[in-house]
Amino acid sequence: MVGIPTLVHVGLVWVPTLASIFLSFTDWNGIRFSDMNWVGILNYEQIVTVFERDFFQAVINNLVLLLFLFIGPTALGMLIAYLLDKELRGSRVYQSVFYTPVVLSLAVVGFIWQSVMYSTEHGLGTEIFGGGEAVNWLGDQSFLIAFSENYGISRNFVAILVAIAWRHTGYIMVLYLAGLKSVDASLKESASLDGANEWQSFRLVIFPTLKPINVVVAVITVIEALRAFDIIFVLNTPRRTQVLSILTTNNLLGEGGGNVGRGSAYAVILFLLCLGFVVWYVTNHYRESEYQ
Amino acid sequence: MTKRLWTPSPSPSRVGIPLGRRSFLKASAGAAGLAIGGGLLAACGDDDETTEASSGSADGGLVLGSASGDLTIGSNYSNELPQMGLQAAVDAIPNGDINSMINEVDHNTFQENITTYLQNPDDVVPWFAGFRMQFFAEQGLLGDITDVWEAGLNDGLGEGFKTASTGLDGQQYFVPWTYYIWGVYYRPSVFEENGYEVPSNQDELMSLAEAMQSDGLVPFAFANDGFWPAMGTFDQINFRLNGYQFHVDLMAGRESWTDERVRNTFQTYADLLPIHQENPNGRTWEEAAAAVVNGEAGMMTIGTFIGSQFPDGDVSDLDFFTFPELNPEFGTETVEAPIDGWMMAADPANEGAAKEMLYHFGTATAQEAYLAEDPSVVAPSTEVDTALYNPLQAKVLEAVASAPTVTQFLDRDTSPEFASNVAGPRIADFLADPSQLDSILEDMQSQAEVILGG
């Protein structure tokens, strides 16, 4: 019975993956197989020597997104969940409010923020923070934090991060809320009887029991950060907001597409990055299981 | 570099204008090139096309009226007016035995999936003239329709259009359908009210801009969301300063982006930025056009399609002038007028019907039927009744007909990959920080070498 799912998995996942790896060493234009030439590592070479500015900025953006999701929305989501778990009055209303963005796809989130918040002249963000001036939210590619002259975290990417956080926080909140509900109330009780303050009881008693949730959140965050695509794509990829999946797509599809070789090379690099996290996760997870 | 990543790029000089780099004399004779037919304005009501249609071709080529059966037509005419126009044009085919079916796809989706689509296409396919048609013709994805042209399309379409429809192998693969022009669009009422004059050179342009600024207007509305609108201004400055041939050679990868002339183009662009709206990269062209429509901005370098942003498409208060002269050597001889049209699949299910439909699309009957619904463009057939045109269309027609050389557009005159992955983003970088020009140009050149195989 395991045979069929395995076959489907291999056919739908591993065959295309291996094909991409193969194609990344060719110069195929996506039309006829007979036009395909083996070019060795030329595509990879060109990515880091000729197209390096767009490429390294994309890697930086992917990693910044990963780090940001761990720090921003995860901490905020956890805090909101902790507060809502206290059975405040109207906590269901708050839950719904924070959770609503999660049912929207990131592409829709992009459209909403573009038109409502980030419209240069008339956006809500402009009205609130602009002080009467137009604010170029998505078009300002100057660096908020510069790593060097050519690389850094651009202002428009930060604007996109905020839009992503708007949705992601609710997601994290729901996960932790479910986790907190399952924490045995007697644990909290005994902690407070032992004289633990709120922070100590959260850090030393509740947080450790949330471990399974933490693992889920970590996995989701890594996946979200590496597969990021839709919100940036629908915003027409403002300069310096590109991520690896965008570079892959721009070379494979679209008007600049048909460049299967280099597009596949970008995809393989993204794949290796994912693989790195998977290996790290699997080894850690199993090592910890062994201890138990 | 050991190998080319991209198929050797067809030369845009073959697009429209058979201008060889080496033989300038020969070229200037041909430079009538896309001079889209001298008789463009003169001819109307000529009935040649109908007689040709019924008699067909003498040498056993295409016999019009003989085809029958189902025909599939791909369409990216996904907005309401173009959609109705296409339906009307298809319905107007004289041969009632052809049962046409239009398969419509959203305009952008069609464009993004064109490579995949052409491997399993409809019989008749919409696309762009010139370089971008030639690329697919060279890949063997298009059907040769030379016999459609031989059946009499030449009579109604100027030589320039034929050249724009010709592949690198000298055969025809394209039937021109509509075109429009890039220029500086403005509202005549605003000019009249403030006593502005249409500028004819850079000094006049600058003093006009100064006058507008003192009247509280932004001289040029400016947008670059999607990275193509600012290419328009780049093209205008580039061929005004450096001439048509330099544009063509630069696009084809025969001239370098680090050339002093390109630097001059960007320098002039930078000089003109203070009279443009700030921060174009975050603004859509529709938003910029709105500034012209509601009188906040005086003018905008854009295509005729700006008319769609006027309330109810009413273009009675819309006019344009060609970009002013920047270099006396080249004057204002070049205009940019992208041509849209139709092609045939390499292996159509119903070849006879497909060719008849393509012939029909090249005639005044079909083009007039289309224009009746979508008045934002101009038809290439000289037999189209010019009395049907509004003053704006008539002016587009005149401007293109009187221009010795016509370009398509940056993203149509070079490899689409170079245009959308390199030129667009890099021009955006330049607009964000003109002081980065040197490193931007070096980047563009090294990437052009990889992509265009230069």
Image (spheres, coloured by chain):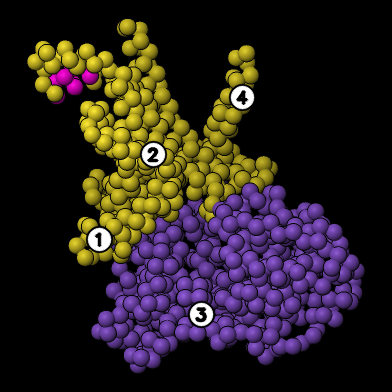
Chain colours: A yellow, B purple
Q: Say whether residue A203 is magenta.
A: yes
Which numbered tag is attached to residue B314?
3
Give amino acid for label 3. Answer: Asp
Q: Which residues are magenta?
A: A199-206
Name the side, left or right, on which B119 lies relative to A203.
right
Label 1, secondary structure: give it.
helix
Label 3, secondary structure: give it.
loop
Give amino acid for label 1. Answer: Glu
First of labels 2, 1 by sequence position: 2
Q: Nearer the viewer, residue A194 or A270?
A: A194
Q: Are marks 2 and 1 on the same chain?
A: yes
Q: Nearer the viewer, residue A107 or A19?
A: A107
Name the side, left or right, on which B146 lies relative to A217.
right
Label 4, secondary structure: give it.
helix
Residue B114, horizontal then vertical, whole percent: 61, 54
Which numbered tag is attached to residue A127?
1
Residue B72, relative to residue A197: is it above or below?
Answer: below
Residue A139, horizontal then vertical, whole percent: 33, 58
Q: CA distance from mark 1 to mark 4?
A: 53 Å
Q: Which residue is mark 4?
A: A8
* Residue B113 at least partly seen: yes
Q: Say whether residue A256 is magenta.
A: no
Residue B158, horizontal then vertical, whole percent: 69, 80
Mark 3 touches mark 1? (CB < 8 Å): no
Q: Which residue is mark 2?
A: A102
First of labels 4, 2 by sequence position: 4
Q: Please, which chain is the residue tagged with disc 2 on?
A: A
Q: Main secondary structure of the magenta part?
A: helix
Give amino acid for label 4. Answer: Val
Q: Are marks 3 and 4 on the same chain?
A: no
Q: CA distance from mark 3 to mark 1?
A: 32 Å
